[in-house]
Image (tube, rainbow, N blue to C red):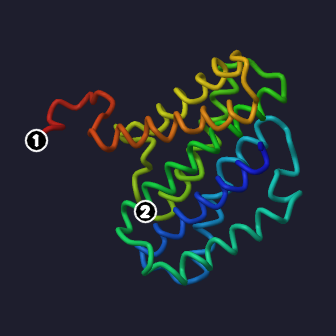
Amino acid sequence: MFYTLDIIGTVAFAISGVLVALSKRMDPFGILIIAFVTAVGGGTLRDILIGDTPVSWMKNMTYTYVILGSTIFTVVFRHKIDYLRKSLLLFDTVGIGLYTVVGVEKGISAGLNPIICVSLGTISACFGGVIRDILCNEIPVIFRKEIYATACIVGGFSYFLIKKLPIDIDIAFALAGLIVIVVRLLAVRFKISLPTVYKDEAK
């Protein structure tokens, strides 16, 4: 289940990276680079922080093949993916949901404190998008008032609570990831955001 979620998250993030690159009208090489850093950027930082090197995508070529395949698929069928912005939101949200629980579980496997595990999950989920947005000359979503990293934190701590229930670990994985996705989508749907320190924000 852990590996499956990691692969699905990689696909989701790669597609979100391609959608952003296409909106910036990048060339094929630029599209592939953005897809790659979006998909593995957060996981790479996570693995380096816990000393798990070489990092996952260097040890397992499946990640590279999955990113390449997702990139080609999205470029070829980009006109079939209606509502580009909504598609980006969906794939990005699925990516952060799956990568959060993957990162948390990696922290648990490394014997780290639950707070650090949740931090690793948040880094795994968010920092690929941060790198993507910086390279595409955008202010990263995580640095704006949107509910993004907050959703990862809620899902991360929920995972520890759900694991205490008498249910299968795979179900706990799925539920925690779903919590991240639902929190993020509800925040976007109902325009829920973090408080701002800027008094003229509403102007």
Separation (CA) of disc 2 from disc 1: 29 Å
Quickly name the residue at label 1: 203
Q: Which mark is residue 87?
A: 2
**Which of 170 and 134 lies nearest the eye of the viewer?**
170
Q: Quadrant of the N terminus?
A: top right
Q: Is residue 57 left or right of residue 141?
A: right
x and y percent of residue 127 in the render? 58, 47
x and y percent of residue 143 in the render? 42, 41
Q: Is residue 110 above or below residue 60?
A: above
* SS assignment at label 1: loop
Q: Quadrant of the C terminus?
A: top left
Q: Is residue 141 left or right of residue 28?
A: left
The label nearer to you, 2 versus 1, is 2
x and y percent of residue 192 in the render? 30, 34
The three-letter amino acid code for the residue at tag 2 is: Ser
Q: Which mark is residue 33?
A: none
The three-letter amino acid code for the residue at tag 1 is: Lys
| Neighbours of disc 2 within 10 Å: few (<14), some (14-19), many (20+) | some
Q: Is residue 81 left or right of residue 123?
A: left
Residue at the spot 65% in from the left edge and 42% down from the top edge:
124
In primary-sequence order, the first of circles 2 and 1 is 2
x and y percent of residue 146 in the render? 36, 40
Corner quadrant of residue 125: top right
**Which of 101 and 144 lies nearest the eye of the viewer?**
101
